Image (spheres, grey):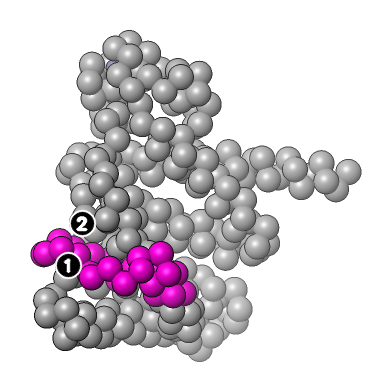
């Protein structure tokens, strides 16, 4: 019976994640374009007709439309169902890794912010302030929650909050260091201001220890994947994470269908 319960729980968590992923698709498309997240409802940017509710079902909607708009048959990027499925899988992974409601909720939010920022960075090479700054605030709120869960005293909560604040500050310093070393080695500053805010945001969520660990892993993987490419051709904004940076070398255009 236990496997049935685990399976059903995973399915429910996956569906929740896929629905959040569907919303992330909207965030990724609309925030850089300066559009409202809520109005108008999902529609095809080509023929502007509203999507039917059942076409909006994560992953499945794309499958039964066979990747095309119901009305004008414009292609819908496969990235939409992929983002939904990936978010669903990440949610399931976080759920079984953390087991406790608050950390799971916190890391669901963190991964959602990271996913949206990574794909916006990939599409537009910018990191919107509205997302990095709200992510930083929510990250610090998460630390307050963790502090309250661990030791519901003022001292316990402020200790945990300090971990997040220290993480944010070290994120900024680390970013400065990368920029300084980068400009000494390559003779140019290759990073945009949004990247510093991303580093601070990640520090707020992870605390300084895990931030350093994550930076180290990102650099190791980035060095391996990127193979010593020089940071950016010119003045474009580049993320502190070389892994994200290495994506920039892949030519890409934003998917064609708003959802
Ligand atoms: Zn259409």
Q: Residue furthest top?
A: 71
Give the percent coordinates (x, y) of residue 86. Answer: 51, 46
Which mark, by number, is residue 18? none
Is disc 2 surrounded by few (<14), some (14 to 19) or many (20+) residues within 10 Å?
many
Nearer-the-camera pick, 190 or 71: 190
Give the percent coordinates (x, y) of residue 218. Answer: 42, 71
**Where's ligand 1: which quadrant?**
top left
Does 124 sit left or right of 226 as displayed? Answer: left
Contact flag, marks 1 and 2 (Cβ < 8 Å): yes
Tell me if residue 170 comes above or below residue 246 in the rendering.
below
Residue 34 in sight here: yes
Residue position for label 1: 192
Question: Would you say residue 216 sits in the magenta stretch?
Answer: no
- Magenta segment range? 217-242
Q: Earlier in the sequence, mark 1 or mark 2?
A: 2
Does 114 sit left or right of 240 as displayed? Answer: right
Using the rendered view, name the quadrant where residue 53 is placed: top left
Residue position for label 2: 126
Find numbered disc 1 in the image and state the secondary structure of the residue it sits on. loop
Question: In what quadrant of the picture does the C terminus appear?
Answer: top left
Which residue is rendered at x = 59% and y = 73% of the image? 149
Which residue is rendered at x = 21% and y = 80% of the image? 182
Instruction: Say whether mark 2 is within 8 Å of ligand 1.
Output: no
Which residue is rendered at x = 33% and y = 50% of the image? 119
Give the percent coordinates (x, y) of residue 8. Answer: 73, 40
């Amino acid at each position: 019976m236990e496997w049935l319960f685990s399976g059903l729980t995973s399915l429910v968590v996956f569906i929740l994640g896929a629905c959040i992923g569907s919303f992330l698709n909207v965030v990724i498309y609309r925030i850089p374009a300066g559009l409202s997240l809520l109005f108008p409802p999902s529609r095809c940017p080509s023929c502007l007709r509203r999507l039917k509710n059942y076409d909006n079902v994560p992953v499945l909607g794309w499958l039964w439309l066979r990747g095309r708009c119901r009305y004008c048959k414009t292609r819908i990027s496969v990235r939409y169902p992929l983002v939904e499925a990936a978010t669903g899988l990440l949610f399931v992974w976080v759920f079984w890794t953390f087991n406790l409601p608050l950390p799971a909720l916190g890391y669901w939010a963190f991964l959602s912010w990271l996913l949206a920022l990574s794909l916006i960075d990939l599409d537009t090479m910018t990191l919107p302030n509205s997302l990095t700054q709200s992510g930083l605030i929510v990250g610090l709120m998460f630390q307050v929650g963790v502090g309250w869960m661990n030791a519901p005293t003022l001292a316990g909560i402020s200790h945990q909050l300090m971990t997040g604040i220290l993480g944010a500050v070290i994120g900024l310093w680390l970013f400065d260091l990368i920029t300084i070393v980068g400009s000494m080695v390559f003779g140019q500053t290759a990073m945009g201001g949004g990247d510093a805010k991303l580093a601070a945001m990640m520090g707020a969520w992870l605390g300084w220890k895990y931030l350093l660990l994550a930076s180290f892993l990102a650099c190791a993987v980035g060095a391996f994947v990127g193979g010593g490419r020089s940071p950016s051709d010119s003045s474009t904004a580049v993320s502190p994470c070389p892994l994200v940076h290495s994506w920039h070398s892949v030519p890409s255009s934003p998917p064609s269908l708003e959802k």
